[in-house]
Image (cartoon, grey):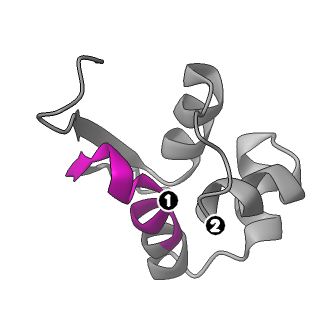
Amino acid sequence: MIINRTITVSVVIDDLPRVIREAREQLGLTIAAASRKAGLDQSHWRHIENGRYKSIPERTLDKMIKALGLDLEINWPSHCSCG
């Protein structure tokens, strides 16, 4: 039996790397397994989780959240005119 589960998470953009890491760990996935599931390079996933990128391409983020079964609502900081 396959169960599709989506978790809706409201997150401040600065917390995104932590939220991704925690979601992956809660699913019991290694970085290797999660990146494979998303079709991403393992080192790329690791760098995103560690917050080493200032920006994440929307397509990459979409692959990551789908692989983790997340539905993210991103809240932009009040000092940011982005989003």
Q: Residue furthest left?
A: 78
Relative depth, front residue between 19 and 83? 83
Q: Amino acid at mark 1?
A: Pro
Relative depth, front residue between 39 and 47? 47
Q: Is residue 83 above or below residue 49?
A: above
Q: Residue at x 33, y 44 (%)?
A: 13
| Location of residue 7 (image quadrant) | bottom left
Q: Residue at x 24, y 48 (%)?
A: 12
Q: Residues within 10 Å of mark 2 (few under 14, many from 20)?
A: few
Say whether residue 45 is left or right of residue 22: right
Sequence order check: which comes first, mark 1 or mark 2?
1
| Location of residue 82 (image quadrant) | top left
Helix, strand or loop at disc 1? helix
Say whether residue 57 is left or right of residue 25: right
| Residue corresponding to mark 2 | 50
The magenta region covers: 10-21
Q: Which mark is residue 62?
A: none
Position in image of residue 55 (x %, y %) = 58, 33
The reply to whether the C-beta atoms of the residues labelled 1 and 2 are less than 8 Å apart is yes
Relative depth, front residue between 44 and 26? 44
Q: Residue at x 66, y 45 (%)?
A: 53
Q: Amino acid at mark 2?
A: Asn
Helix, strand or loop at disc 2? loop
| Residue corresponding to mark 1 | 17
Q: Residues within 10 Å of mark 1 (few under 14, many from 20)?
A: some
Q: Is residue 4 magenta?
A: no
Q: Is residue 19 magenta?
A: yes
Measure the C-alpha gap from mark 1 to mark 2. 6 Å
Q: Residue at x 44, y 68 (%)?
A: 18
Position in image of residue 4 (x %, y %) = 40, 50
